[in-house]
Amino acid sequence: MNNNLIKRFVSSIIIIPLAFFFILKGGYYFNFFLITCLILSLFEWNNMKINYLKKNIGFIFILFSFYSAYKLKILELNEETIFNFSTIIIICIFTDMGGYIFGKILKGPKITKISPNKTYAGVLGGFLCSIIFLYSTIYLGKYIININLIFNLENILWILFISLISQIGDLIISYFKRQSNIKDTGNLIPGHGGILDRIDGMVFVFPVIFILNQYL
């Protein structure tokens, strides 16, 4: 196990529970957490060496993304809403983990020059881990929380859709990092890089889910 993988693992077991503490506590805790992540994300985006128009579009999009996350979280303060919000985040996390692990182990053909570390094996790994998460959630949900889900084709397609948007978001941020000639958006999180490196998929997933909720 290489040094970077160890750092990534240690960071994850600290950051993920901490993030869910703020999410589940809600109220001022959640608002503080969201605003902190927003400020850090905007700061990292501002450090990107891209043209004025792209940078400003990025600022607007990041603001809209965090607004979407806020609205989805406070839409209804009940168990189901918190569960759905948490599920979106965990699918993105599992997608990222699956992509990283499968890509490192299986390697294989690269997807694009935009992100040299992204492989087809990593993409499939991201999808597979999302499905495993869905099955685990349905199984454990019957015993932990009062929410009954069915492991059917509709739910599988929904999870795969979220995973796909997350992976597209990852590629888009990678494109801008490559334009800026940097490996990571920051160095705040050992093994991961910056905040945007950690939430690049979520930044794109939340606006899509928010818009779908509003109009469908």
Image (tube, rainbow, N blue to C red):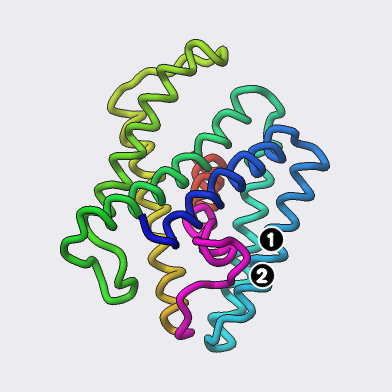
Q: Is residue 79 above or below residue 4?
A: above
Query: Quick one: 21 or 54, which is closer to the camera?
Result: 21
Magenta residues (range): 180-204
Q: Amino acid at mark 2?
A: Leu
| Whether residue 75 is situated above or below residue 186 in the rendered picture | above
- The answer to which of 15 and 116 lies nearer the viewer is 15
Could you say where residue 149 lies in the image, as x and y percent from the top left? 43, 18
Please name the residue shown 75% across and 56% down the image. Answer: 35
Q: Which mark is residue 38?
A: 1
Residue drawn 61% across and 81% down?
A: 47
Q: Is residue 130 left or right of residue 34?
A: left
Is mark 2 in CB contact (under 8 Å) with mark 1? Answer: yes
How many numbered callouts? 2
Q: Is residue 189 magenta?
A: yes
Secondary structure beneath dot 1 equals: helix
How far across and how far down the image is residue 62, in percent?
61, 64
Viewer-proximal residue among 211 and 173: 173
Q: Residue at x 28, y 57 (%)?
A: 104
The answer to whether 34 is drawn above or below residue 184 in the figure is: above
Residue at (60%, 74%) from the top-left corner? 45
Mark 1: few/some/many CA within 10 Å (<14, 14-19, 20+): some
Q: Which residue is mark 2?
A: 42
**Circle number at residue 140:** none
